[in-house]
Amino acid sequence: MGKTYERIDGRLRTFIEEQPMFFTATAPLSEDGTINLSPKGLTGSFAVVDERTVAYLDFAGSNAETIAHLRENGRITLMWCAFQGPPNIVRVHGSGEPVFRDDPRFGELLEHFPDIDPTRHGLRAIIVVTADLIRDTCGYAVPFMSYDEDRDLHAKRFAREDDASLSAYFEKKDHIAHSIDGLPGLPLPLPPTTV
């Protein structure tokens, strides 16, 4: 049933880019550390950079577990599943890195997301993932569900923030500067944007 791919192209790329949401999974190295699984959405916030590299925009939220885990060990798995159409699940296992706003690569990476205004969402970083293993499986047990539209609540909430107020918001949260397990998370105050 499952197939391994050398690259993200053709039918596989089309499938990934058509999904309205995906999931990220990371974990610290500590055997008793907290495993993190996060849903990701917002149309335009994901991009295939090349045949083995994908990226997504990391927006404001109430924790920074993915960033902390990637800073510690770089391990990440991304997963898409078909809730409509033929059944399919695609996983990209790889190495990830948070590219922060003051990184010289930030502006060039941001060009891969022309269909979204990141300033409305409190953009913290761009997560870049290099694929080590790309696989799909059947997804026969994944239910049919319909996609109606993106929620507008995130943009409404964070569009009113500037860098200073966003940093102040993050500093009040328990798990932004450090993960649940105490790993370094998002650098605060927020680095300035280089673009």
Image (cartoon, rainbow, N blue to C red):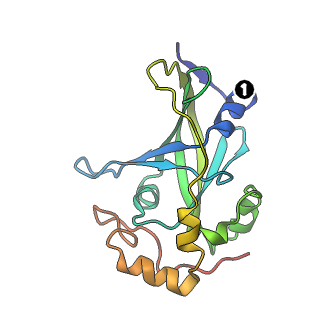
Q: Is residue 141 above or below residue 23?
A: above
**For mark 1, what is the residue?**
11
- Left or right for 170, reference 54: left
Instruction: Give above or below for 173 relative to 31.
Output: below
x, y percentage for residue 150? Answer: 60, 52
Q: Position of residue 83 (x, y in %)?
A: 54, 30
Image quarter for residue 48? Answer: top right
Residue visible at 40% across and 80% down in the picture? 171
Residue reaching furthest bottom?
Answer: 164
The image position of residue 161, as x and y in percent, is 56, 80
Q: Quick one: which residue is furthest to the left in this view?
A: 32
Furthest-top residue in this view? 1
Q: Is residue 11 visible?
A: yes
Q: Is residue 143 left or right of residue 20?
A: left
- Count numbered badges in the picture: 1
- Horizontal side of residue 176 vs 60, given as left or right: left
Name the amino acid type tagged 1.
Arg
Closest to the observer, 145 or 35: 145
Residue visible at 53% across and 63% down in the picture: 153
In the depicted view, which residue is nearer to us: 180 or 85? 85
| Mark 1 neighbour density, 10 Å: few (under 14) some (14–19) many (20 or more) | few
Image spot of residue 97 (x, y percent): 55, 56
Above or below — where is 136 with respect to 149? above
Observer able to see residue 7: no
Which residue: 59% across, 67% down?
155
**Quarter of the image where the C terminus is located:** bottom right
Disc 1, SS: helix
